[in-house]
């Protein structure tokens, strides 16, 4: 009886502990959001979204160029990354030969695992050094490299999940393989593919390391894509490490804006996916 | 219709990739960054078509980026060595001193104000030999101050810094042990301490960490309202960095300024000379291909040597000696 | 019966080419192949560039780069060991915290929680994985570091100060703080993947254990978890690979000291933080080459870990199908 009692007590303790673990880990996100809102909310004013940063020590100004700069970098990354991921995924799912596909999958996983700072080094050697300037192109390129594996995986995965009966039906009706893929299979998998792309964008929106020596930074508006470009993640890093209270305040606000965008993108992608799943079932 | 779309797309891409005529990119020292940013802002107000984007990443960065030609000009508190100059193949680098500044030992010791440091105590702290605030050597120099029995948190630079160079140059001059063990450079193998990024990072760390000490350009201590100590100079007097003491440190060098303007004025002789003073330089290529950029840079330099100098005192720097300004104005002609 | 079989004349080369361009399927095969191949080529090119640009330091130091402990730009002496040490140490600290926490939460979410709660909590945890590194760094500087400096580190020194692990001043920044932040970044992976692995364990296993009289905990810990151990181990590998390469949050709280220190409270450096802080400013070719070589070392480390995780995943699926 004694042993049973002991075992039961142990049972209750350990199971409670796992509950505690869950509470801690699940609430971490709320804590983070809470801190950002508490510290950054007051600084989110019209100036923040429309003005340029002021020089050291002066109070005021905003991060308008960083917000736009981030947008520009994401667009460049998406323009490069989405087609490559999408087309590559189609190849792996629909056309691929066995060994080459394995090779592509392996290198995509490898690319996915490359630390973002190393991707920054690569973009620097390939674009910044030959062209002799920092640019939005270099930053966008570095970010696209991080997007590609995500888009590739998602596209392949969701294309494969489309039942073969759809393909066979289309081919039986006389459609070419290309037509089958583009008009039947891809639309059937579109929610999943879209989810993958949104997740890819959300992933790169917050990255600062690849931008440190590619798009660098700019006090002013970047008039072309060939110049250094300000970005939200870089500015957060720069402002947080300074000694000015006003700059800290702006870092909090920028952090809040960035996190809000990233979380919204993530939640939206899940919503898209769940809609797709229920549509398929229904 | 298709053709027209193609042309529009082509032109759009061409427009976005055409080199911007007016944003001049520069990078370098954090030491003079506050006054540079003010200058660039004021110059832009007077000449609205000229935009100079200055990124303060440290003197090491200024030298590196100029060598790689990823910026139009650099800025550094450490004059480029012959070895570094040899690596720049596309053009010759012209050193233009811009202001004088002082590096102060800033500290965060609750209850202690107006601390006095000497070359011996400062090098001892940074070598890790002096570990606590109430070490006998510090107490001796600061009679009457209640120094706590706490560990000293040493803060230095984590990036390639001209401020570090000036600081280590000074320590090398006053401490043979420092010279042998560590030496003077923009990046050294620091025996102890935390690293902060940029003058801003060091100031930030010291401000947030009790019982810490760091070295920053004077304006960073002033702007963040932090305490900074006085230094014992070569003549044996304790002086605090300001307009007069820094100018006095440069007085001797001004008379014997070499043609390429590369000098060190640390541990300068003079009754009230501040021992950790330095010139800071803009590193300008002697050949600038882009005609508009060349004109803008030359105009800026001319403006900086005259109107710009008036801003120095208000921002806790010291203006250049008149003889040096005259020599630099002659050097302007060398920019082709 | 003389059937005339019409055979096409053998096609000449130009005919074959035109036939190719008319065949839509072959074109799309080619186009998608090019895109897929570009992924392969870019990755190969990346490794190549890292190799080439680290040539100077590889030639000068050879393998002693990995064991050298001095990093002195003044004398051009560069050794990677302090950074490898810092990277491994901070990741290890992260795992020591996040593995028990993560596996514990995964157990709760797979065994005890009702499905709706389990899905909701997993959703929250997975969102955590999306929080950008620089934002966690921002939070760390202003909230975690003062907390560490004023309360946690003095407490550790007070209680465990005799151990060399907890000596030295309480800076607030350092290995321990970096490890804590990394723990936050790694437990989402452990929870998400371990939960999947635990959910995949067949019901019969649990029921068999319970039928034999085990408590719920005993059934879970002694039967279910071992069954899912390969998946859990895989999640740890993936978490570790992520921790090794983390840059921004770590750079902001590691303290930036280039030495090897035993105390967890001491400032240090990781490979990623070193590259981030110094890359744009490395004066001197050997300095820059050494930084690229550091990147190569980091890349190799993460590659080995990811390969290990892949093998585990393959082993899990194979084992799972055999166990049926």
Image (cartoon, coloured by chain):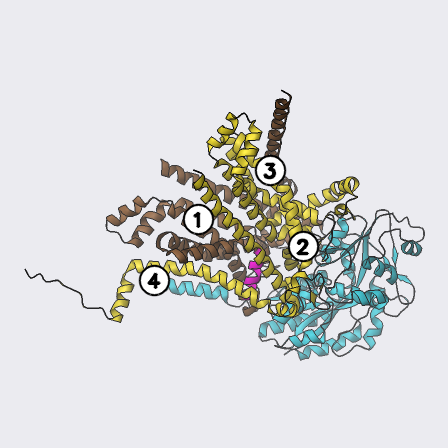
Chain colours: A brown, B cyan, C yellow
The chain ID associated with circle 3 is A
**Residue A44 picture location, percent across and down:** 61, 45
User: Residue C216 got which mark?
Assistant: none
The chain ID associated with circle 1 is A
- Do the dots labelled 4 and 1 sit on one chain? no
Q: Assess whether mark 1 and mark 4 are in contact (beta carbons under 8 angstroms).
A: no
Element class at badge 1: helix
Q: Quadrant of the C terminus of chain C?
A: top left
Please say if B229 is above or below A14. below
Q: Which residue is mark 3?
A: A25
In this rendering, does residue C115 appear at all?
Answer: yes
Q: Which residue is mark 1?
A: A154
**Residue A145 picture location, percent across and down:** 50, 57
User: Residue B2 got which mark?
Assistant: 4
**Residue A51 picture location, percent across and down:** 60, 53
User: Residue C85 got which mark?
Assistant: 2
Determine the CA span between mark 3 and mark 4.
55 Å
Residue count near mark 4 (Cα–Cα under 10 Å), binned few <14, some 14–19, many ≥20 = few
Residue C291 horizontal side relative to residue B219, left or right: left
């Amino acid at each position: 009886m004694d042993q049973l009692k002991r075992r039961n007590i142990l049972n209750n303790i350990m199971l409670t502990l796992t509950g505690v673990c869950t509470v801690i880990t699940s609430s971490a996100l709320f804590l983070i959001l809470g801190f950002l809102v508490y510290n950054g909310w007051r600084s989110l004013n019209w100036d923040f979204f429309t003005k340029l940063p002021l020089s050291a020590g002066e109070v005021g100004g905003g991060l308008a160029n960083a917000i736009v700069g981030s947008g520009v970098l994401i667009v460049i990354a998406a323009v490069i990354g989405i087609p490559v991921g999408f087309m590559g995924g189609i190849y792996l799912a629909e056309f691929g030969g066995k060994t080459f596909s394995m090779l592509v999958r392996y290198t995509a996983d490898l690319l996915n695992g490359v630390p973002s700072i190393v991707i920054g080094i690569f973009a620097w050697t390939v674009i910044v050094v030959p062209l002799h300037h920092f640019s939005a192109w270099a930053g966008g390129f570095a970010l696209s490299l991080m997007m590609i594996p995500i888009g590739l995986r998602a596209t392949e995965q969701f294309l494969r999940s489309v039942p073969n009966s759809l393909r066979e039906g289309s081919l039986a009706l006389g459609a070419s393989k290309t037509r089958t893929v583009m008009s039947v299979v891809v639309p059937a998998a579109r929610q999943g593919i879209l989810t993958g792309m949104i997740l890819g964008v959300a992933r790169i929106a917050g990255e600062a390391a690849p931008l440190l020596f590619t798009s660098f930074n700019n006090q002013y508006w970047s008039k072309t894509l060939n110049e250094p470009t300000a970005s939200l993640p870089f500015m957060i890093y720069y402002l947080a490490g300074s000694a000015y209270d006003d700059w800290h305040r702006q870092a909090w606000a920028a952090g809040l804006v960035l996190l809000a965008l990233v979380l919204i993108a993530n939640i939206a992608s899940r919503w898209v996916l769940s809609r797709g799943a229920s549509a398929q079932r229904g | 219709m298709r053709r027209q779309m193609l042309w529009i797309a082509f032109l759009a891409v061409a427009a976005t990739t055409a080199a911007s005529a007016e944003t001049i990119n520069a990078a370098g020292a954090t030491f003079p960054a506050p006054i540079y940013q003010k200058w660039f802002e004021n110059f832009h107000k007077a000449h609205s078509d000229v935009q100079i984007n200055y990124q303060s990443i440290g003197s090491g960065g200024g030298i590196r980026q100029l060598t790689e030609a990823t910026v139009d000009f650099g800025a550094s508190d450490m004059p480029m060595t012959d070895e570094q100059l040899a690596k720049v193949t596309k053009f010759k680098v012209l050193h233009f001193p811009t202001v004088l500044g002082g590096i102060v030992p800033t500290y965060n010791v609750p209850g202690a104000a107006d601390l006095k440091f000497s070359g011996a105590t400062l090098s001892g702290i940074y070598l890790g030999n002096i570990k606590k605030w109430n070490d006998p050597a510090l107490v001796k120099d600061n009679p009457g101050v209640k120094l706590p029995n706490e560990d000293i948190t040493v803060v230095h630079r984590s990036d390639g810094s001209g401020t570090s160079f000036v600081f280590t140059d000074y320590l090398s001059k006053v401490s043979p042990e420092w010279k042998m063990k560590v030496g003077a450079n923009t990046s050294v193998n620091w025996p102890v301490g935390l690293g902060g990024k940029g003058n801003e990072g060091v100031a930030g760390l010291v401000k947030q960490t009790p019982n810490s000490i760091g070295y920053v350009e004077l304006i960073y201590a002033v702007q963040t309202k932090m305490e900074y100590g006085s230094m014992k100079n070569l003549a044996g007097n304790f002086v605090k960095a300001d307009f007069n003491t820094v100018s006095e440190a440069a007085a001797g060098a001004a008379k014997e300024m070499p043609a390429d303007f590369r000098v060190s004025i640390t541990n300068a002789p003079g009754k009230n000379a501040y021992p950790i003073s330095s010139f800071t330089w803009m590193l300008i290529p002697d050949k600038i291909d882009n005609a508009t950029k060349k004109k803008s840079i030359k105009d800026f330099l001319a403006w900086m040597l005259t109107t710009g100098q008036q801003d120095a005192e208000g921002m806790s720097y010291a203006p250049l000696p008149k003889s040096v300004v005259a020599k630099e104005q002659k050097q302007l002609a060398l920019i082709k | 019966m003389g059937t005339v079989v019409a055979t096409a004349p053998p096609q000449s080369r130009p005919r074959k080419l035109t036939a190719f361009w008319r065949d839509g399927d072959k074109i799309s095969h080619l186009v998608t192949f090019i895109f897929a191949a570009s992924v392969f080529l870019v990755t190969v090119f990346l490794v190549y560039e890292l190799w080439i640009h680290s040539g100077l330091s590889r030639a000068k130091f050879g393998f002693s780069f990995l064991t050298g402990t001095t990093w002195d730009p003044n004398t051009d002496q560069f050794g990677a060991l302090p950074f490898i040490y810092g990277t491994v140490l901070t990741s290890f600290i992260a795992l020591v915290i996040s593995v028990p926490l993560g596996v514990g939460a995964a157990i709760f979410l797979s065994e005890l929680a009702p499905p709706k709660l389990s899905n909701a909590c997993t959703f929250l945890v997975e969102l955590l994985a999306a929080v950008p590194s620089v934002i966690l760094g921002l939070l760390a500087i202003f909230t975690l570091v003062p907390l560490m400096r004023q309360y946690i580190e003095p407490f550790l020194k007070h209680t465990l100060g005799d151990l060399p692990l907890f000596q030295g001043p309480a800076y607030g920044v350092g290995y321990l703080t970096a490890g804590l932040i990394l723990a936050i970044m790694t437990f989402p992976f452990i929870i998400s993947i371990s939960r999947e692995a635990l959910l995949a364990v067949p019901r019969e296993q649990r029921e068999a254990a319970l039928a034999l009289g085990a408590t719920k905990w005993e059934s879970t810990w002694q039967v279910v978890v071992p069954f899912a151990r390969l998946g859990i181990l895989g999640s740890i590998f993936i978490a570790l690979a992520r921790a090794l390469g983390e840059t921004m949050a770590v750079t902001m709280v590691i303290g930036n000291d280039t030495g090897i220190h035993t105390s967890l409270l001491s400032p240090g450096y990781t490979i990623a933080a070193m590259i981030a802080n110094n890359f744009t400013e490395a004066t001197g070719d050997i300095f820059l080459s050494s930084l690229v070589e550091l990147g190569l070392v980091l890349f190799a480390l993460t590659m080995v870990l990811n390969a290990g995780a892949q093998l585990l995943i393959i082993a899990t699926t194979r084992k799972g199908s055999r166990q049926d």
